[in-house]
Amino acid sequence: MFGESMERKRLKGQFFILGALALAIAFYIGLNIPEKIHTPHADDLVFMSRNMKKDLPLALNLGLMDDTGVQTLNNFTLFSKSVMRGHYINYSLVWAVVETLPGGQINVTVGNYWGEDLDINMNVNDVNQPVSGILDSSTFTTQFPPVGAPFYNFTLEFGEENRTVEFANEKVNLYSLIELKRGEALIREEIAA
Amino acid sequence: MRGFWHLVDAVLASIILLGFVVVMGQNIAVMPQEEPLNYLAFEELMELDEQGILRDHAIAMDYAGLNSHVTLYVYNHSIEICDSSDNCVGERPEDKNVWVGTYVISGKDAYDPHTVKLYVW
């Protein structure tokens, strides 16, 4: 008799626990719990990319004023990479300076700062020039035949990137693809000037 | 014997209750988000550049003069300017909760790269 009574009391206690658990689950499900806010700390990547969109072409212009165009662009690239590194930003870029020589040929200088050696394909008005193994942090210069028109198409292709821009024959043109990365936050921008 | 089972019930109930509180706490307690003042700092530097104020002061390493043009009146702010050799002048605050906006310039009339940092707190 006593054992039976105890069994009933034990079961009663367990029902209380199960009831409490069911209530807790119902309460939990019923609540509209907001998702945790994850801030990727990508704000400064946006700022820095805006900054680079402004000052990368300016660096080339400043260099052209004292006939050190590509060299100055090179120096500014290394300077800005070092500043970004101080902010734990992995800054990668490829740029191309495209200008018409006095003889009409199109001179193309490519700067590879992508963080790895690259196979790059360049195209000016359907004339193709593939170049293999351009070393990281180096430049490569080549020439294309005259285009004989005020505007021409320039295509830069490497890895999965394939970009075509229209350039003017009468000026020094800059094209750059920049990438700023920190952890999973990534910003990729094009600069054409 | 009865007391023992009451004790077991009480312990189980406590474990369930604690587990519930912990699970709820993990999901509801969201860290308070601070206002991103680095955005304000960068916008301020860009605005000073648009106004033609920033580059002259940066190249002259005139941090006090540049700081006097900063219009973030609600906050404390200071400027630090570094050249390409990483020689820096200016005031870096010691406070704990400081935001910084960084702006890189290539030069103005000639190539002369500098970094301008605006600290806001």
Image (spheres, grey):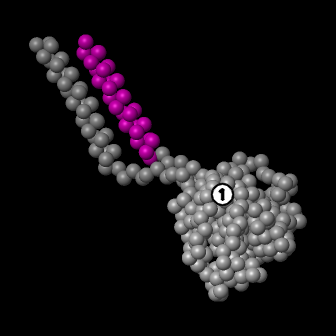
Say above or below: A61 vs B32: below
Magenta span: B1-28
Residue B117, x across and y down, in percent: 76, 59
* Image quarter in which the N terminus of chain A is found: top left
Residue B13, x across and y down, in percent: 32, 29
Disc 1 target residue: A134
Total number of numbered labels? 1
In reply to whether residue A2 is colored magenta, the answer given is no
Residue at the spot 28% in from the left edge and 40% down from the top edge: A23
Q: Nearer the viewer, residue A53 or A125?
A: A125
Say above or below: B30 vs A20: below
Q: Amino acid at mark 1?
A: Ile
| A94 lies left or right of A27 | right
- The image quadrant that residue B83 belongs to is bottom right
Residue at the spot 53% in from the left edge and 48% down from the top edge: B31
| A12 lies left or right of A47 | left
Chain under callout 1? A
- The image quadrant that residue A76 belongs to is bottom right
Residue A107, x across and y down, in percent: 71, 73
Residue at the spot 67% in from the left edge and 54% down from the top edge: A136
Residue at the spot 34% in from the left edge and 32% down from the top edge: B16
Q: Nearer the viewer, residue A70 or A33?
A: A70
Secondary structure category for the residue under label 1: strand
Q: Nearer the viewer, residue A50 or B20?
A: A50
| B84 lies left or right of A48 | right
